[in-house]
Each structure stands twice: as structure tokens, then as C-alpha cells.
């Protein structure tokens, strides 16, 4: 059950992201049609990111303008990841959540040695 104070426009995508093993969303904001759509999340390791981020690429979802920004706090305590989408991109977020839910994270190919 999502928190009572979560913006309803982000629920579907947050739930789809949280179903990816190793991904935990920590906060979100739909942007209220004026600011970018944003979901903050923590990966258990960097290895889980490519399979998740695959669906936010225009080539795979059909939607442009989605990106992940990585930053740290003033104490350089840890890295924080923020998924950002275009302002008002609620239908896009739901469609990407649908792809992620239907297909899951894309398996990452191992590098040849």
C-alpha cells in the first residue's frame, strides 16, 4: 500500500520500480504539471541499474526526456539517484511502468573475458 501522502500520478511507476530486485524508491513528486516528474531511489548495487534504466530510454519506451541524475549530499555521505521525467508526463510514466511490469528489468549481458 503506498503512503497516504504520495502524489497519485507517481504510484504506478514507483510500484513498478520497487518490484525490481535491488531497487527501493525513497521519495517522489509528480511535479504538479509545472515541475519535472521525479522519483528518488536507491539501488542495492550499480549492477541493477542497466536493466531498470533500459525502459527510460526513448529507443525502448518511445518516450524522450527521461533521465537519471546522480548526486550526493553536503557530507558526501552517499550517492542519491533521481529519475526525472518531463513535467506533466503522467501517461508516459504509466506506460513505462507497464513495460517494466510486463517485461521486468532487461537482463544485462555479461562482458566477454
Image (spheres, grey):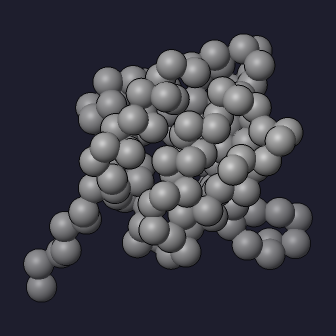
Residue drawn at (65%, 56%) of the image: 25
- In the rendered image, residue 34, in percent from the top left (x then y), is placed at 76, 15
**Residue at left 12%, top 85%?**
113
Residue 107 place in picture, x, y as percent? 24, 63
Relative to 112, say whether 15 is above or below: above
**Is residue 46 toward the left or the right of residue 36 in the image?**
left
In the drawing, does residue 28 fall left or right of residue 91? right
- The answer to which of 15 and 80 lies nearer the viewer is 15
Q: Quadrant of residue 106?
A: bottom left
Q: Is residue 70 among the parts visible in the rendering? A: yes
Q: Quadrant of residue 81?
A: bottom right
Compare residues 84 and 102 and report the one nearer the observer. Answer: 102
Residue pushed farthest left? Answer: 112
- Side (left or right) of 111 relative to 16: left
Extreme residue in the bottom direction: 113
Task: Report the number of discs.
Answer: 0
Image check: 41 left or right of 3? Answer: left
Task: Check the image and report above or below for 58 versus 5.
Answer: above
Q: Residue at x 61, y 62 (%)?
A: 24
Q: Using the image, determine if residue 45 lies above or below residue 96.
A: below
Residue 71 shows in the view: no
Residue 37, percent across and down?
66, 29
Question: Residue 100, relative to residue 94: is it above or below?
Answer: below
Amino acid at each position: 500500500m503506498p503512503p497516504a501522502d504520495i502524489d497519485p500520478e507517481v504510484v504506478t511507476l514507483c510500484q513498478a520500480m520497487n518490484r525490481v530486485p535491488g531497487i527501493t524508491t525513497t521519495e517522489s513528486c509528480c511535479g504538479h504539471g509545472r515541475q519535472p516528474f521525479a522519483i528518488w531511489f536507491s539501488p542495492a548495487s550499480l549492477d541493477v541499474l542497466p536493466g531498470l534504466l533500459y525502459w527510460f530510454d526513448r529507443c525502448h519506451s518511445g518516450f524522450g526526456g527521461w533521465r537519471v541524475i546522480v548526486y550526493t549530499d553536503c557530507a558526501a555521505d552517499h550517492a542519491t539517484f533521481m529519475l526525472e521525467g518531463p513535467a506533466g508526463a503522467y501517461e508516459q510514466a504509466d506506460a513505462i511502468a507497464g513495460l517494466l511490469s510486463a517485461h521486468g528489468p532487461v537482463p544485462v549481458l555479461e562482458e566477454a573475458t
